[in-house]
């Protein structure tokens, strides 16, 4: 491999040149400039290989390598593991957030899908309002800056855009599917969710004998919410 190429296939020798003209100029010597007295002519002679030293790329080769460099650099950046939103956060006194932090990496990489049920009391003026809903944890991780939640700058609450949302006082309800789950409101067991990858049912009925195949239910004791329940669903990957 050429010494100017790194292991990702990036030609570092071209990093300093924004244009082909700049590249040719780098091969023009002071002697060339003195005798030719014409920068454009000097560039033409370098391009033809009459002046300059070493291999001279054609304009097409130069532009192709620059484009290949950008593609290789982008691929390299995309392959760098992203720092977890929960990384280096002290959550020892916040049970719910610690549970989310413990699951973050697996949820992000797709080994685990998690549904979060939250019921909470919100204050509007002098009145208290109860809201509840089911959240696709992976979807919210992908669409929000979750570090604000782990830093406790924001409180995680269901919204009308989540899997389900219920505003008790105003009797406002919304149901939505997400990238990971479909919502089944016609089941005899009440509200259920179907995982889109393995088509398994997640039964969120608290009185059900089981929440479903490959699913575990955890009720989290916390003073920050009226109620929190986590449903972890492990999908089986084909080898």
Image (cartoon, rainbow, N blue to C red):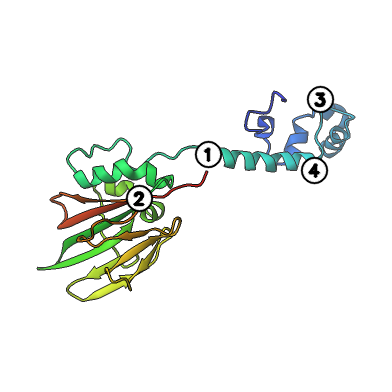
Residue 181 on image: x %, y %: 39, 61
The residues bearing labels 1 and 2 have C-alpha atoms spaced at a distance of 30 Å
Check contact, mark 1 vs mark 2: CB within 8 A: no
Up/down of 154 relative to 168, above or below = above
Q: Of circles 1 and 2, which is in front?
A: 2
First along the sequence among labels 2 and 3: 3
Up/down of 207 relative to 221, above or below = below
Check contact, mark 2 vs mark 3: CB within 8 A: no
Secondary structure at numbered mark 1: helix
Check contact, mark 1 vs mark 4: CB within 8 A: no
Secondary structure at numbered mark 4: helix
Q: Of circles 4 and 2, which is in front?
A: 2
Callout 4: 10 Å neighbours few (<14), some, many (20+)?
Answer: few
Secondary structure at numbered mark 2: loop
Residue 97 on image: x %, y %: 24, 46
Check contact, mark 3 vs mark 1: CB within 8 A: no
Residue 9 position by quadrant: top right
Residue 188 on image: x %, y %: 28, 71
Q: On the image, numbered disc 3 is attached to which residue?
A: 54
The residues bearing labels 1 and 4 have C-alpha atoms spaced at a distance of 29 Å
The residues bearing labels 2 and 3 have C-alpha atoms spaced at a distance of 63 Å
First along the sequence among labels 3 and 1: 3
Decide if residue 133 is on the left or right side of residue 27. Answer: left
First along the sequence among labels 1 and 4: 4
Any mark on residue 60, and which? 4
Residue 126 on image: x %, y %: 9, 68
Q: On the image, numbered disc 2 is attached to which residue?
A: 214
Q: Of circles 1 and 4, which is in front?
A: 1
Residue closer to the observer: 189 or 83: 189
Any mark on residue 79, and which? 1
Residue 39 position by quadrant: top right
């Amino acid at each position: 491999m050429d010494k100017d190429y790194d292991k990702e296939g990036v030609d570092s020798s071209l990093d300093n040149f924004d244009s082909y003209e700049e590249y040719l100029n780098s091969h023009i010597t002071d002697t060339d400039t003195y005798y030719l007295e014409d920068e454009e002519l000097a560039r033409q002679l370098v391009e033809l290989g009459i002046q300059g030293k070493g291999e001279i790329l054609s304009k097409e080769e130069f532009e192709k390598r620059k484009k290949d460099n950008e593609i290789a650099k982008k691929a390299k950046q995309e392959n760098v593991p992203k720092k977890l939103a929960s990384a280096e956060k002290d959550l020892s006194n916040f049970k719910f957030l610690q549970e989310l932090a413990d699951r973050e990496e697996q949820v992000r990489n797709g080994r685990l899908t998690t549904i979060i049920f939250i019921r909470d009391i919100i204050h509007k003026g002098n009145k208290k309002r109860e809201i509840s809903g089911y959240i696709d944890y992976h979807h919210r991780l992908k669409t929000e800056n979750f570090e604000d939640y782990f830093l406790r700058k924001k409180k995680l609450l269901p919204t009308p855009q989540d899997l389900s949302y219920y505003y008790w006082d105003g009797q406002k309800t919304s149901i939505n599917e997400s990238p990971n789950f479909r919502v089944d409101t016609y089941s005899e067991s009440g509200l259920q969710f179907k995982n889109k990858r393995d088509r398994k049912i997640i039964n969120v009925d608290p009185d059900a004998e089981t929440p479903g195949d490959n699913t575990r239910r955890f009720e989290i004791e916390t003073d920050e919410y009226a109620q929190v329940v986590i449903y972890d669903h492990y999908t089986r990957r084909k080898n």
